[in-house]
Amino acid sequence: MTAFAYVDVFAAAPLTGAPLTLVPDADGLTDAQLRAIAREFNQSETTFVVTPTRPGATRRLRSFTPTGEEVFGAGHNALGAWLWLAGTLLTRDADTFYQEIGADVLPVYATRSPDGRISIAMEQSPPFFGAVASDRAALAAALGLRESSLVADRDARVVSTGAGHLLVPVGSRADVDGVAVNADRLVAVLRECGGEGCYVFTLDGGAYARFFNPAMGIPEDPATGTAAGPLAALLVSEGLAPSPVVIEQGHAMGRPSRITVTVTGSRVVVEGSGVVSATGTLRLS
């Protein structure tokens, strides 16, 4: 039998934020089992904690989408894992751990407040600014929007801090809330520009966003650290927002989330907390 937990990430209370299924002791599982378990839970990502393979790493994390794709960015998949892990590893008010994700070993900063609440800050990879989605009409059609909803003087661009997502600026919160994705069209747009997922955002009343990744089996995600990091890096680099950047997400799904990202040069740090909302046991034999 294998233990698992549900962690609500970037959340102040249970049943909000981004739900993550975590398997904290997955060394004995095969890759086929990891993919099957991710399909079974059907969350945007299921994270498995295993023994690290790189020097200096405290733990290695592997995350899979419902379609069985392994993803490597440090977002809610990693932050939720460390909320759980810090509950046993944190022996003082604050400590630093190191997570192995893909080819990276990245620092994780865990703190415990006087009321016992744990918060996690994670460094992501330095930002990489990639290709632009050049066909604005095709992009608007893929999102179910009028082309006039796209901000006229700003490009939709792929930016990565570990995972490359297409960041799409629109004019208002109503435009963000009005997105109705055509999955096939959006997958075609993302393949053309080299994006993994799509983060539609506005600066109307503060940073407000929704995330879609149909190619990975994620119709919508309520909180996406691997997209929030790139968005904050882009906004700070272009002088559109000061650091730290607070991004609201998940409202359209009834799971409001707040993601804080601090950008200092090429250093991008995603911060948040959450709650363990359930635990259980997998019976695999």
Image: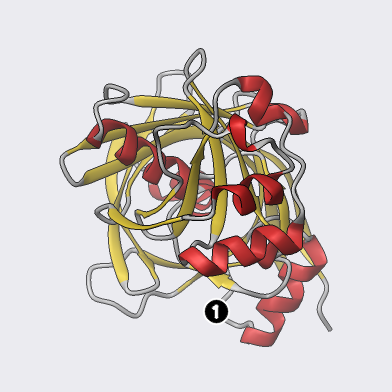
Tell whether 29 sits left or right of 37: left
Position of 3 relative to 12 (above/below): below
| Color encoding of the figure | secondary structure
Q: Residue at (49%, 52%) from the top-left corner?
A: 166
Tell whether 47 sits left or right of 19: left
The front one of 98 and 101 is 101
- Quarter occupied by residue 24: bottom right
Percent across and percent down for residue 93 are 32, 31
* Residue type of the residue flagged with mark 1: Asp
- Quarter occupied by residue 208: top right
Q: How crowded is mark 1: few (under 14 residues within 10 Å), some or many (20 or more)?
A: few
The front one of 110 and 239 is 239
Query: Residue beneath label 1, please?
Result: 27
Q: How many marks?
A: 1
- Quarter occupied by residue 172: top right
For the C terminus, the image quarter is bottom right
Percent across and percent down for residue 127 are 28, 52
Q: Helix, strand, or loop for circle 1? A: loop
Q: Residue at (43%, 75%) from the top-left corner?
A: 51
The front one of 224 and 195 is 195
For the N terminus, the image quarter is bottom right
Position of 176 relative to 129 (above/below): above
Q: Can residue 10 be seen in this view?
A: yes
Percent across and percent down for residue 280 are 77, 55
Q: Residue at (66%, 58%) from the top-left corner?
A: 186
Q: Is residue 82 visible?
A: no
Residue found farthest to the top: 205
Position of 228 relative to 106 (above/below): above
Tell whether 55 sits left or right of 245: left
Q: Residue at (51%, 12%) from the top-left corner?
A: 205
Percent across and percent down for residue 228 are 45, 40
